[in-house]
Amino acid sequence: MVIDNNFYMSLALREAWKYQGLTYPNPAVGACVVGKNGEILAVEAHQKAGKPHAEVNALQKAYAKLTNNDAILALKESSEIHNYLLQNHNNIFKDVTIYSTLEPCSHVGKTPSCANLIASLGVKNVYVGCNDSNKIAANGNNLLRQNGANVYEHILEKEALALLKPFLLWQEKNFVFFKWAQRLDGSVDNGIVSSKASRKHVHALRDRCDLLVIGGNTVRVDRPTLDARLVNGKAPDILILSNQKEFDRTIPLFNVKDRKVFIANNLEKVKEYKNVMIEGGAKMFEATKDIVDYYLAYVAPTFGGTLGFATNKKEYFSIVHSEQKEDLLLWLER
């Protein structure tokens, strides 16, 4: 039987992209567990910092499938899942293969070591997208090899590094992404553009950001709150990019508890934050293009507006990731 390693790794990558931006300060990571006959036992991702890593979530689901015992699925904390698997695995993982977009972690932090768990379960074949450059968590591949596992590196490495890019930038400076929503006709006006699911996703991203950049005209016209209420999350600090410093302080964004609001005609404040989201239209696009790492576009399958997002200048993007729900979600790079 021919095993398509790229196919299984692509499943792990696609699952991880669902949580891009939501795992800060941790990286987005996906994992796929495959049975001895090539059957897919689990495809999971790391979903939130402090919660189980991708490999642990995948092994948890795979255990339930292999044993027909759902008791393990009630466990939520990583240490609980680790302990349950170590005490009850009975060598059922000796013929499975694990695909992980990132080298399994070797250290014990808020969660136990994934590499130690995989080695202890007797998994013989591990395929890795890209190696971990974080010195604290690295060397998981070596640990696995020392315990008898076969580790195969650089599987869809280019795609794995694209997924990892925000995390790599957090180590050096910051990660800045620009978000907008438009219809199929390119319009951005005339009421709500994107679906409820897309708006909820935006709020989840705001919850994980520490700074949100918005234009002064948008603040005056839309009078937004710019919080994360749809996910009961925290509201990020705000930088209003504006030449005019005077604003109506009854605009809701100024009255969110524990939030700092800055007003400036430059982007220097962005350097003080690690995970930065920019919302806006064509003018904001032009003003921030030199600092943006990724673009996030929500394209609604509708017509209905008159004002387009696009600038008059030609711009070319590569699609880093696409996902279709009620709207088309595109992660882009200039």
Image (spheres, grey):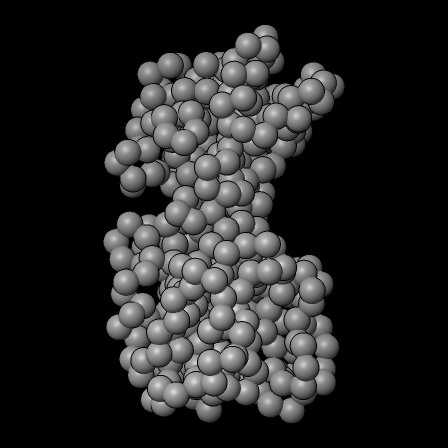
Q: Using the rendered image of the protein, determine whether residue 177 is visible from the camera's viewpoint.
A: no
Residue at figure coordinates x 53%, y 49% from the top left: 19
Look at the image and tell me in which quarter the C terminus lies: bottom left
* Quadrant assignment, res 214: bottom left
Q: Residue at x 72, y 18 (%)?
A: 69
Spot occupied by residue 63 in the image (x, y as percentages of width and height): 63, 21
Q: Look at 57% across and 26% down and name the residue there.
A: 59
Is residue 139 among what the camera can see?
A: yes
In the rendered image, the vertical position of residue 96 relative to residue 259, given as above or below: above
Q: How many labels does the image show?
A: 0
Which residue is at the front of the view, 7 or 33? 33
Q: Which of 225 and 182 is in front in this view?
A: 225
Residue 157: where, in percent of width, then height? 41, 45
Q: Is residue 105 above or below residue 172?
A: above
Left or right of residue 122: residue 289: left
Residue lying at 32% horizontally and 80% vertically, measured from the top left: 264
Question: Is residue 183 depicted above or below 132 in this figure?
Answer: below
Residue situated in front as seen by the camera: 188 or 48: 48
Q: In this view, does 88 lie to the left or right of 117?
A: right
Residue 304 coordinates in the image, percent (x, y): 72, 85
The image position of residue 11, as x and y in percent, is: 58, 43
Q: Quadrant of the N terminus?
A: top right
The quadrant holding residue 178 is bottom left
